[in-house]
Image: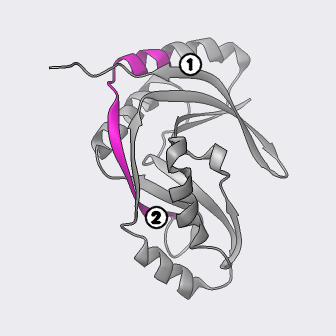
């Protein structure tokens, strides 16, 4: 089964993300991420055997317990692989970016699979862009756009089933971060 590790977007921020997505309407064949599927990709695991699941869950639980809940500020649109050749548009993390990166590094070390890039929230995939100049202008304008703040409280192991209408995600495990110490 095809799996990945994620931090789900707080549902209260879905409308703010949708407002950013709408800026790209009419630029070509762009597939927007459905609101219920919005998440920060921490690590893509690829094909995972059923026999590997328990060990992966144990490792993710350990990583989660070794990290405290923290706030992130979701800000800035970027592109993979580059702004000149766009396949994916994403939102990034500003506040506590280093905590999110540290969480990702721990997941990268704990579970098998290809090492992941910067944690990112995919907002759309580009099939074809008809107005690249306008796309570049919009990207420049949204380079610092702020979506909002959310608490990172858990990481999830998700199964991804690809369908002609888009991916279907299923939670295979939710692993809660520790509550921060009160002082």
| Quarter of the picture holding the N terminus | top right
Residue numbers of the magenta segment:
59-80
- In percent of width and height, residue 97 lies at 31, 46
Place residue 19 in its image quadrant. bottom right
* Front position among marks 1 and 2: 2
- In percent of width and height, residue 160 lies at 71, 37
Residue 40 in sight:
no
| Quarter of the picture holding the C terminus | top left
Q: In the rendered structure, does residue 69 fall within the stretch colored magenta?
A: yes
Please tell me whether mark 2 sits on a helix, a strand or a loop. strand
Against 49, residue 29 (above or below) is below
Place residue 52 in its image quadrant. top right
| Dot 1 and dot 2 residues touching (CB under 8 Å) | no
Question: What's the residue at 61%, 12% (across, down)?
Answer: 54
Mark 1 residue crowding within 10 angstroms, few (<14) / some (14–19) / many (20+):
some
Q: Is 14 situated left or right of 126 in this image?
A: left
Question: What's the residue at 64%, 50% (across, down)?
Answer: 35
Place residue 145 in its image quadrant. bottom left
Question: What's the residue at 59%, 47% (across, down)?
Answer: 38
- In percent of width and height, residue 74 lies at 40, 52
Q: Give the farthest residue toward the right.
A: 164
The Cα–Cα distance between marks 1 and 2, rounded to whole angstroms, is 30 Å
Decide which of 157, 14 is in the foreground and name it: 14
- The residue carrying mark 2 is 78
Question: What's the residue at 50%, 49% (across, down)?
Answer: 13
Please tell me whether mark 1 sits on a helix, a strand or a loop. helix
Q: In the rendered structure, does residue 4 fall within the stretch colored magenta?
A: no
Mark 2 residue crowding within 10 angstroms, few (<14) / some (14–19) / many (20+):
many
| Label at residue 56 | 1
């Amino acid at each position: 089964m095809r799996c990945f590790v994620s931090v789900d977007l707080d549902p209260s921020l879905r409308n703010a993300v949708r407002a950013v997505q709408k800026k790209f309407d009419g630029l070509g064949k762009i597939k927007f991420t459905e609101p219920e599927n919005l998440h920060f990709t921490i690590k893509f695991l690829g094909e995972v055997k059923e026999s590997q699941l328990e060990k992966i869950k144990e490792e993710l639980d350990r990583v989660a317990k070794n990290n405290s809940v923290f706030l992130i500020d979701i800000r800035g649109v970027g592109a993979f692989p580059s702004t000149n050749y766009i396949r994916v548009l994403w939102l990034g993390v500003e506040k506590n970016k280093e905590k999110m990166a540290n969480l990702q590094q721990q997941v990268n070390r704990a579970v098998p699979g290809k090492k992941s890039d910067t944690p990112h929230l995919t907002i759309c995939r580009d099939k074809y862009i008809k107005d690249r100049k306008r796309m570049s202008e919009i990207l420049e304008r949204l380079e610092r756009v702020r979506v909002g703040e959310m608490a990172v409280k858990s990481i999830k192991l998700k199964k991804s089933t690809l369908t002609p209408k888009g991916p279907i995600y299923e939670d295979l495990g939710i692993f809660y971060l520790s509550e921060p110490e009160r002082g």
